[in-house]
Amino acid sequence: MTPSASSDALEQQTLRAHLEARLARVRDAQPTGLHTTRDIGVIAVLRAFDPATFAAAAYHFATALPDSQSRPWYAAFTRTIFLAGDPRNLADRHPFDHVSPDGSIAWYAPAPLTSREGLRRLLRPLRGPRGLTAPLTQEIPLGNGNTMARLDVPVTGLSLEDYLVHVNHVIAEATLDGLLTGLGHLLLHHLPAPPPPAANARIRVVSDPGSPTRLRAHAYLTL
Amino acid sequence: MHGPARRLLLAPVTITATKPLLPTHVKGFLWVDTLFRGTRLVRDLEYYWNPRAANLTGQTIQFWDYLDRRHPELDFAALSPDDLGHLYVRCHASGDIRPMDRLRHYTERVEREGWVHPATRAATCDWKRQLDLLGVHDPGLSADRPTVASIDETVELLARRHLCVDHRRHGGPAYLDGTRWGMPLRPVIGVDAHANYLLVILRDLIPRLATGDEVLLVYDEDLAHDYALLARVLAELGARPSRLPLGRVPIGGVVRSSRHGGWDGHSLGRLAELCLREFDPAVYRLGMRLYFIAMLKRTASEPFRPDLLRRALSRAGRMLGEAGEAGDTGDLPAYLRGFATPAGWVDPYRLTDGLFARRAPAALLDHVYL
């Protein structure tokens, strides 16, 4: 085996471990009894997008959820649907549960998605095929602590809609697992390519669309 | 702000000159012409038609591109309008159309210099000839009216009023936002960066409307959702809109857009030829109005029926025979006011239907129908 082949195998192994750890956490969150979380989801409505505003909103929304809402959501893989829309026009007919301080992103708490059909019919799935720029670094205040977490996102070739999915899963699940509690800041990095290996607390892993037997990393959280 | 006698802007949806005039278009032109000529005798009115609105649509530009690629040899001035219409049908049926982001050079030429493809220039000439024969006022079918506001200016203005969600920065669409009224987001600029007809209408109308101005939107019933949203947006910007939806005229029992074909033998040129063989031009003008306005009515429920058109022409002949001398218009404005809608424009249906029931002022036929 060449060194690069062996490092690739190692990397795939690491990614698989992250994926399996996530599946285990989701299983642990499953409710006992007859309840199902299959249809549970969150809806986020974006008028505009800015990386820091979005990351902060994802954190503050998740952190404010009571257990009774966050557990079923976690068990449903923190499923979130991102829609284009203007929260200012929705407040009357479809009051939301959380909104970013600048009013650009509204969040609807975990609920059966069938109960949100009216809202979904009104809006459109968010689309941003041009994607994002790298490099970019933004510091996002989380709380009063002195320590900092770091989120690296390789953005080359990533559409805005996919970016939102990946970043939101990592932030939401880390928040609900208490990993970000007591931290002062989150340092958000957009990179052109995946970062070098590090001891990551979380890696967002999905199967590689070009090669289904392989895994691919999309966001790296380091504490 | 204007005084109590507010101006009315009459703004029908424009039709793309890529085919002959067909019964649905004839109905639209006759309704709007009667409305315009009746209303202008009772109040200040502007009939606004901008060919650029139709020339900037994807349907038109994709057809121009198709012609340039597939039929570069054609002499459009020598091509019959029906044959052009057949090419239009073939183009849209073939799927041989290129995405709008590859056709920006056409859009830019229309925007920059008001350029019109020779095929559309030829079709417009035919339309003008046919409408002239029918006594229809030309609202500027071949006029060049540069759009005052740019796409960016219009989107920014709408976004400031929370009427637009603009995701173009990320390569996404821009939407007209009527969600506060429970109306779904309506894309007006696609991911191909092409602005659709709704945005062109807004670019055109917004700078023309002062606060309090009235605007009458006339459109194809199929566009009801878009026009309901458009009216709300214009009202939010300070105008006072009213709406007149018109149903398409079904041919052979089918209601469909002209780009799907099925209209052979029904072009206005062909109808004129048949009618004028038997009836004189004044009878043709009045009879066509009796048929397309009073007999077909506003909705799309009645199919086109040549036998009923013939009956309308015979009736028009009798009406013209019985009409007295067209004197001055003295009592005409008062008579027309009796047919005004609450929004202040003369209702073409009630006015025309009234011709069957009673003796109208002789000047009415002269000023509105002939």
Image: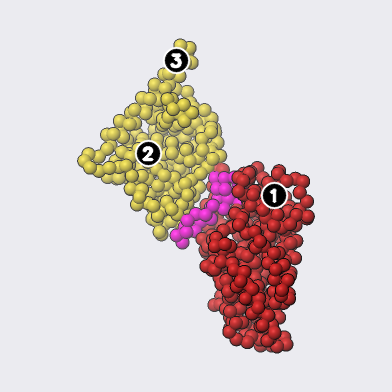
Chain colours: A yellow, B red
Residue B5 lies left or right of residue A91; in this view the side is: right
Q: CA distance from mark 3 to mark 2?
A: 33 Å
**On screen, A94 above or below A14?**
below
Q: Is residue B221 visible?
A: yes
Q: Quadrant of residue B214?
A: bottom right
Mark 3 or mark 2, which has the lower sequence index? 3
Of labels 1 and 2, the one closer to you? 1
Q: Which residue is mark 1?
A: B64
B101 and B357: which is toward the camera: B357
Q: Which residue is mark 3?
A: A6
Q: Which residue is mark 2?
A: A172
**On screen, B111 above or below B238?**
above
Callout 3 secondary element: helix
A71 and B219: which is toward the camera: B219
Q: Which residues are magenta?
A: B172-195
B134 and A137: which is toward the camera: B134
Q: Image quadrant for the N terminus of chain A?
A: top left
**On screen, B110 above or below A58?**
below
Q: CA distance from mark 1 to mark 3?
A: 57 Å
Residue at 78% across, 55% down: B77
Residue at 49% across, 37% down: A138
B357 and A213: which is toward the camera: B357
In x, y percent, where is residue B108?
A: 70, 49
Callout 2 secondary element: helix
Task: Name which residue type carries label 2.
Answer: Ala
Residue at 37% across, 41% down: A79
Residue A109 colored in magenta in the image: no
Crowding around mark 1 (Cα neighbors within 10 Å: few <14, some 14 to 19, many 20+) is: many
Q: Quadrant of residue B271?
A: bottom right
The disc numbered 1 marks a residue on which chain? B
Q: Quadrant of residue B219?
A: bottom right
